[in-house]
């Protein structure tokens, strides 16, 4: 199969070495592994353990805490390569994007307590508990409350999506500590919830209900029924959590853009290989422009989105504002991977629908990026209002 992934040209040998290292580890988890975990809706624990042991899921932890101290740029290469190998980063991407909020806004004590353990692979921070049924895209309307009681806050409410909480030791949880006022971003507080403590001391306060989705995604509804979280586990300032979540969101958008780009390259490469081999009417189907042109088109879209991802990651790592760039990269990448998915399906004809070709699985997986973590409509609204200065529609 041709390797059409552009190298990280001009971005350094270290980045290229990281790409090769991730690629080598992913090679140990072939299509059959992902097919089987998808069929059984099984969490790919062996894969996550392998990446954790290699330190690839803690690359963002600073060296003083035992991590590699790399940036979102590098983290995005890890995510891209997982998806490009035929795998699915959804099993393990949260530790990367939750890190921005913790590193930038967590207290010294919180970082001292948890980051060395995360760096050593002994603790997993893989859950980000924000979305609620009645709030949806309107995050500032969340109703889960955190009420002060002595040295603790008490969490009460319901989150309709919280992925990987059962596979995690820690979760970041956004809850309401103040009324929704004129400044809708105030009154929300971000907590680092130590799930080990909850499971050991008050398991009856946390109910996790798995949600079966159209692909293998370890996601859940969560009921917080008086979960106690120490007040010193507030990340940053009380009532200012929404701001910190946005830092996490920008990282999340860049990382998921990279995942979609990894998918996009995978679809193009698979389809090119198939179009080269498959003979119909006595010649490879790839000789027909009806097959070639959509593939060339899809490849160009993926390459263009890739450039937007590098730019967003560069700004993020430089500590510069990057909301527009992170959102645009996620939008462009998710549209590009979806276009490539459809082209790959068409190229494979009937075989595109057969599980052993893996196109149908990746097709289901890559569709998510248009909807979550933020829907592309909301990104268009963001660009229209925040970048182009048009009036707000909501
Ligand atoms: C597999 C999966 C895993 C997830 N994991 C997590 C997780 O771990 N943690 C977490 O917090 N959340 C998680 N989510 C939730 C995800 O972030 C939300 O689904 C997403 O933000 C969209 O919110 P919603 O589903 O409530 O859609 P809604 O907000 O109900 O929107 C539905 C549709 O209406 C459109 N819409 C709404 N308002 C407007 C408007 N003003 N203008 C134009 N269009 C509009 C949206 O674009 C969308 O197309 C997960 C979701 C999925 C599918």
Image (cartoon, rainbow, N blue to C red):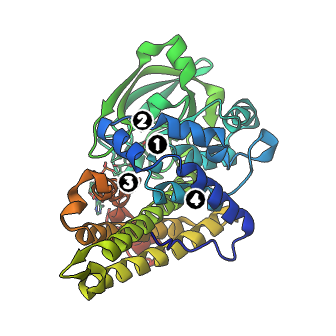
| Disc nearer the start of the sequence (4/2) | 2
Which residue extends farthest front? 282
Q: Which residue is mark 4?
A: 76
| Image position, residue 354 (x, y; %) | 23, 55
In the picture provided, is 71 more to the left or to the right than 263?
Answer: right
Q: Is mark 1 within 8 Å of ligand 1?
A: no
In the picture provided, is 40 more to the left or to the right than 112?
Answer: left
How busy is the neighbourhood of tag 2: few (under 14 within 10 Å), some, or many (20 plus)? some
Disc 3 and disc 4: Cα gap in Å?
A: 17 Å
How busy is the neighbourhood of tag 4: few (under 14 within 10 Å), some, or many (20 plus)? many
How busy is the neighbourhood of tag 3: few (under 14 within 10 Å), some, or many (20 plus)? some
Disc 3 and disc 1: Cα gap in Å?
A: 15 Å
Disc 2 and disc 1: Cα gap in Å?
A: 7 Å
Disc 4 and disc 2: Cα gap in Å?
A: 22 Å
Q: Which residue is mark 2?
A: 43
Disc 2 and disc 3 in contact, CB within 8 angstroms? no
Asked if residue 158 is positioned above or below residue 67 in the image, the reply reads above
Disc 2 and disc 3: Cα gap in Å?
A: 19 Å
| Image position, residue 335 (x, y; %) | 36, 69
Eye-nearest disc, 4 or 2? 2
Q: What kind of element bears circle 4?
A: helix
| Image position, residue 294 (x, y; %) | 30, 81
Q: What kind of element bears circle 3?
A: loop
Q: Which residue is mark 1?
A: 91
Q: Which residue is mark 3?
A: 372
Asked if residue 280 is positioned above or below residue 377 in the image, the reply reads below
Q: Give me the residue at 43% from left, 81% from top.
A: 300
């Amino acid at each position: 199969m041709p390797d059409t992934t552009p190298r990280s040209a001009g971005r350094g040998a270290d980045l290229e070495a990281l790409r090769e290292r991730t690629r080598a580890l992913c090679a140990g988890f072939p299509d059959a592994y992902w097919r089987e975990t998808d069929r059984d809706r099984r969490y790919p624990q062996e894969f996550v353990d392998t990446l954790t042991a290699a330190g690839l899921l803690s690359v963002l932890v600073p060296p003083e805490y035992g991590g590699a101290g790399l940036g979102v740029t590098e983290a995005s290469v890890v995510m891209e390569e997982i998806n490009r190998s035929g795998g699915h980063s959804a099993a393990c991407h949260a530790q990367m994007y939750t890190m921005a909020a913790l590193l930038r806004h967590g207290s010294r004590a919180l970082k001292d307590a948890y980051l060395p353990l995360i760096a050593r692979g002994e603790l997993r921070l893989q859950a980000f508990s924000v979305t609620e049924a009645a709030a949806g895209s309107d995050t500032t309307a969340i109703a889960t409350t955190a009420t002060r009681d002595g040295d603790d806050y008490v969490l009460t409410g319901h989150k309709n999506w919280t992925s990987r909480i059962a596979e995690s030791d820690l979760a970041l949880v956004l809850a309401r500590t103040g009324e929704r006022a004129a400044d809708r971003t105030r009154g929300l507080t971000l907590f680092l919830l130590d799930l080990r403590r909850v499971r050991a001391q008050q398991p009856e306060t946390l109910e996790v209900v798995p949600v079966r989705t159209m692909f293998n995604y370890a996601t859940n509804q969560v009921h917080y029924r008086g979960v106690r979280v120490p007040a010193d586990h507030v990340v940053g300032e009380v009532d200012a959590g929404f701001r910190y979540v946005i830092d996490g969101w920008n990282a999340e958008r860049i990382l998921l853009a990279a995942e979609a780009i990894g998918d996009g390259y995978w679809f193009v490469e698979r389809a090119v290989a198939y179009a080269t081999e498959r003979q119909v009417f006595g010649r490879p189907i790839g000789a027909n422009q009806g097959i070639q042109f959509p593939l060339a088109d899809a490849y160009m879209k993926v390459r263009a989105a890739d450039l937007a991802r590098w730019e967003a990651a560069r700004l993020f790592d430089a500590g510069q504002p990057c909301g527009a760039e992170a959102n645009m990269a996620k939008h462009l990448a998710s549209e590009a991977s979806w276009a490539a998915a459809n082209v790959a399906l068409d190229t494979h004809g009937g075989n595109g629908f057969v599980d052993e070709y893996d196109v149908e699985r990746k097709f289901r997986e890559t569709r998510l990026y248009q909807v979550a973590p933020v829907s592309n409509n909301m990104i268009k609204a963001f660009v229209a209002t925040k970048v182009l200065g048009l009036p707000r529609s909501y």
